[in-house]
Amino acid sequence: MEKIILIRGSSTNEVNEYLEKGWSVKMMKTVNDATTNRFYAYVVLEKEDE
């Protein structure tokens, strides 16, 4: 099973909650919005089907 999560700025609470539940990071892609100078990251999490 996989999930995609969008991280805005330094808010990693949602990702941390999934990691504590046994999910692992499969991929992470950072994005910088040049028009607003904001930082984002897309995180793909994966977990074995139960």
Image (spheres, rainbow, N blue to C red):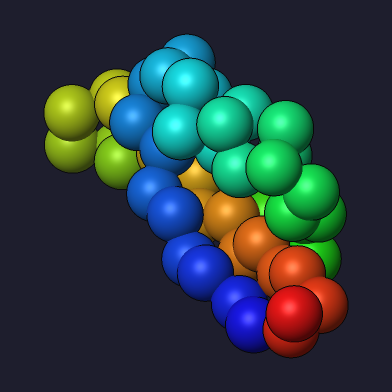
Say whether residue 33 is left or right of residue 3: left
* 19 relative to 43, above or below: above
Residue at image position (75%, 80%) is 50
**Residue at figure coordinates x 59%, y 55% from the top left:** 43
Q: Residue furthest top?
A: 10
Is 24 placed left or right of 6 in the picture?
right
Between 20 and 9, the residue placed more toward the observer is: 20
- Whether residue 39 is visible here, answered yes or no, is no
Task: Using residue 39 as the reference point, say whether residue 20 is left or right of it.
Answer: right
Q: Where is residue 7 drawn, in percent x and y?
A: 42, 37
**Residue 39 appears at what percent x and percent y?**
41, 30
Instruction: Give the image quarter of residue 36.
Output: top left
- Quadrant where the image shows the N terminus: bottom right
Instruction: Name the residue nearer the viewer: 1 or 38.
Output: 1
Residue 14 in the image: state x and y as whole percent: 46, 33
Q: Is residue 16 visible?
A: yes
Residue located farthest toward the left when viewing the structure as drawn: 36
